[in-house]
Image: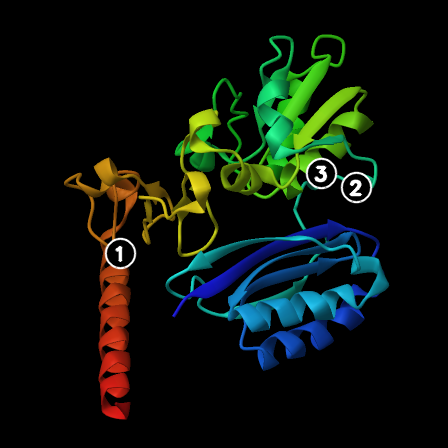
């Protein structure tokens, strides 16, 4: 079975988000959707997976609210369900920067098809607003890595490394567009004037720009069981270490410190014996669960 994966977000005032949450949770449950939807006073942010009909039903349900009537989504497919459960949660922010901003005052959107021309400008500073473990497996040519472990560290990077008088023209990008959109609002609030961000993020770029013209190098990390995608949104080659959560290249998976579901070169030296035993037990439990599921399916046949 092939599952449809939809990613969406919108910065829009939702002062009644606490009232919206239980209704939205119930609707998603009736559609057997899995994934995560975050609601806050500043808007909505979600990635869900299910049947094509279930995903379309959810988007229609959301767009029935006039504030979300123009909600757009990016789609991909997965051969296996990429999420273990459904979460519809209330948050202070739909993407955590930690500093109040006006997300309606954002930089200039740049369509994926116009992105190459923009970033070819030698006077432009190109910034990857994602975390450094995401940057490590892929990014655009010439992009600066802020070296952050969490998006809330981005303001410190700006204060320490950027200057409105020096950096006259800045372009930013992220996975789906939400972080760089909020980052652009922050830069504008700090006096930067020419601020651009990739509309729809890396995922839209990989989907729309032909491989022969692409300036993307590597793979794009995802926060689900697919781990990463390549040009054309084809499945990537990375796996996720269950010991530390770090994405693993094919070379990492060949290292002697790698044990599927237990450890990897990034965490082997700091993984305690107790943690290793817990990881092994967890892995064995998953294998046993899959075997039981297969046996039950065979019995139904």
Is disc 3 placed on a helix, strand or loop? helix
Question: Could you say which disc has been placed on residue 261 in the image?
Answer: 1
Q: Please provide percent x and percent y for residue 289.
A: 28, 76
Which residue has dot 3 on it?
A: 182
Q: Secondary structure at mark 1?
A: loop
Q: Are marks 1 and 2 in contact (CB under 8 Å)?
A: no
- Residue pictured at 51% horizontal, 24% vertical: 145
Residue drawn at x 45%, y 55% is 224
The residue lying at 55 percent from left, 41 percent from top is: 175
Residue designated by label 2: 103
Q: Nearer the viewer, residue 117 or 25?
A: 117
Number of residues whose C-alpha sits closer than 10 Å to that of mark 1, classed few (under 14), some (14–19) or many (20 or more): many
Q: Contact (CB < 8 A) between labels 3 and 1?
A: no
Mark 2 → mark 3, Cα distance in angstroms: 6 Å
User: Which residue ends up furthest to the left in the rendered image?
Assistant: 256
Marks 2 and 3 in Cβ contact (< 8 Å): yes
């Amino acid at each position: 079975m092939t599952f449809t994966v939809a990613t969406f977000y919108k910065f829009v005032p939702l002062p009644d988000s606490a009232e919206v949450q239980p209704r939205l949770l119930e609707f998603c449950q009736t559609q057997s959707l899995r994934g995560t939807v975050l609601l806050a006073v500043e808007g909505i942010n979600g990635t869900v997976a299910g049947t094509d009909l279930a995903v379309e039903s959810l988007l229609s349900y959301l767009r029935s609210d006039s504030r979300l009537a123009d909600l757009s989504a990016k789609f991909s497919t997965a051969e296996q369900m990429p999420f273990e459960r459904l979460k519809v949660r209330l948050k202070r922010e739909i993407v955590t920067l930690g500093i109040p901003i006006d997300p309606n005052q954002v930089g200039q959107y740049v369509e994926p098809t116009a992105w190459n021309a923009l970033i070819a400008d030698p006077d432009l500073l190109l910034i990857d607003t994602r975390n450094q473990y995401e940057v490590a497996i892929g990014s655009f040519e010439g992009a600066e890595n802020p070296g952050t472990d969490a998006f809330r560290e981005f303001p410190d990077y700006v204060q320490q490394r950027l200057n409105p008088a020096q950096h006259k023209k800045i372009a930013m990008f992220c996975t789906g567009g939400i972080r760089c959109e909020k980052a652009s609002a922050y830069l504008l609030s700090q006096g930067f004037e020419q601020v651009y961000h990739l509309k729809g993020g890396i995922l839209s770029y990989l989907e729309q720009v032909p491989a022969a013209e692409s300036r993307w190098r590597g793979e794009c990390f995802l926060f689900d069981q697919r781990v990463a995608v390549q040009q054309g949104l084809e499945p990537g080659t990375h796996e996720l270490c269950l010991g530390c959560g770090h994405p693993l290249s094919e070379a990492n998976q060949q290292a002697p410190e790698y044990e599927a579901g237990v450890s990897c070169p990034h965490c082997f030296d700091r993984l305690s014996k107790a943690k290793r035993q817990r990881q092994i037990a967890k892995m064995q439990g998953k294998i046993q669960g899959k075997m039981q599921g297969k046996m039950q399916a065979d019995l139904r046949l």
